[in-house]
Image: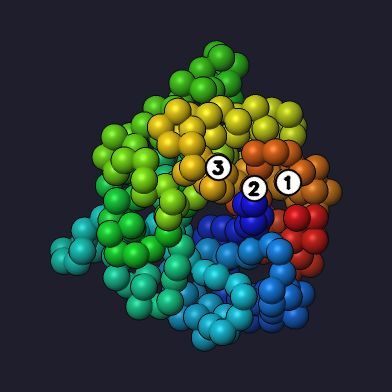
Amino acid sequence: MRKILVAGNWKMNSSQASVSELLTGLLEGTRDGADVDMAVFPPFPYLAQAQSMLQGSSIAWGGQNLNPAEKGAHTGETAASMLLDFGCSYVLVGHSERRTLYGESDQDVADRFEAALAAGLHPVLCVGETLEERENGTTEDVVARQIDAVLDKCGVEVFSKATVAYEPVWAIGTGVTASPEQAQAVHAFIRDKFAALDAIIAGQLRILYGGSVNGSNAADLFAREDIDGGLVGGASLKAEDFLAIYAGA
Ligand code: PEP
């Protein structure tokens, strides 16, 4: 009932040449009408190139972040309307690198989530615990707190137009993947949390797993009941690697 989504977060990696090569490969390797959705998240300067290469295809694209303000004196920032101007349908909010390296609080993330929805973008809310939090046994508390900040501000209904990505910080870019059992346990916790508020929304909500997903582990992860695809960093930068994940979905 929930269609798998494989989403590639390119982070701060790209050039015009690499975008051209990567997207050409993805366009050749994906099928219209497939039972798997694909989206890519280029750095802002390459959104125009993504738009020109991907429009009319089955591959969606989005921004890696947004500023919650509509416009104005925010040097270096990007508004939701600008993402829409370049054909984005998605936007990541609350990626752990934004939270840890750039100090985005749960409240900042909720503001961005709200602004994305208000503009008509589909936010992908990233949540996840650090290694220390997992070892302390506070994984569920942390994930619940991160989600509650958004639920308190926006309510549960809006999650019919949003996606959640569970990304344990200790698994991002480390080559260490959560086992399918570990990931499934947190995904089930997240879905149950939504189900306590609205069973229909919980049943429809796509919950992606992120953290060192690759062509060898994707199929096993995506086969779990509550894992509806992946948010992929390193393995989304080469068409061959990303298509191996797509094939595993
Ligand atoms: C990410 O950036 O969201 C991510 C999961 O990265 P990686 O796949 O490289 O761990």
Across and down, in percent, residue 17 comes to 62, 80
Mark toward the start of the polypeptide (2 vs 3): 3
Task: Check disc 2 and give the amino acid type.
Answer: Asp
Local secondary structure at mark 2:
loop
Task: Determine which residue is flagged by label 2.
Answer: 228
Q: Residue at x 53, y 78 (%)?
A: 50
Q: Label 1 to label 3, Cα distance in Å?
A: 16 Å
Q: Label 2 to label 3, Cα distance in Å?
A: 11 Å
Task: Categorize mark 2 by other alpha carbons within 10 Å: few (<14), some (14-19), many (20+).
Answer: many
Task: Determine which residue is flagged by label 1.
Answer: 222
Q: Residue at x 36, y 31 (%)?
A: 148
Q: Is 118 left or right of 172, judged from the image as shown?
A: left
Mark toward the start of the polypeptide (2 vs 1): 1
Camera-side residue of 56 and 213: 56
Task: Check disc 1 and give the amino acid type.
Answer: Phe
Q: Which mark, by number, is residue 203?
A: 3
Q: How many marks do you count on the picture?
A: 3
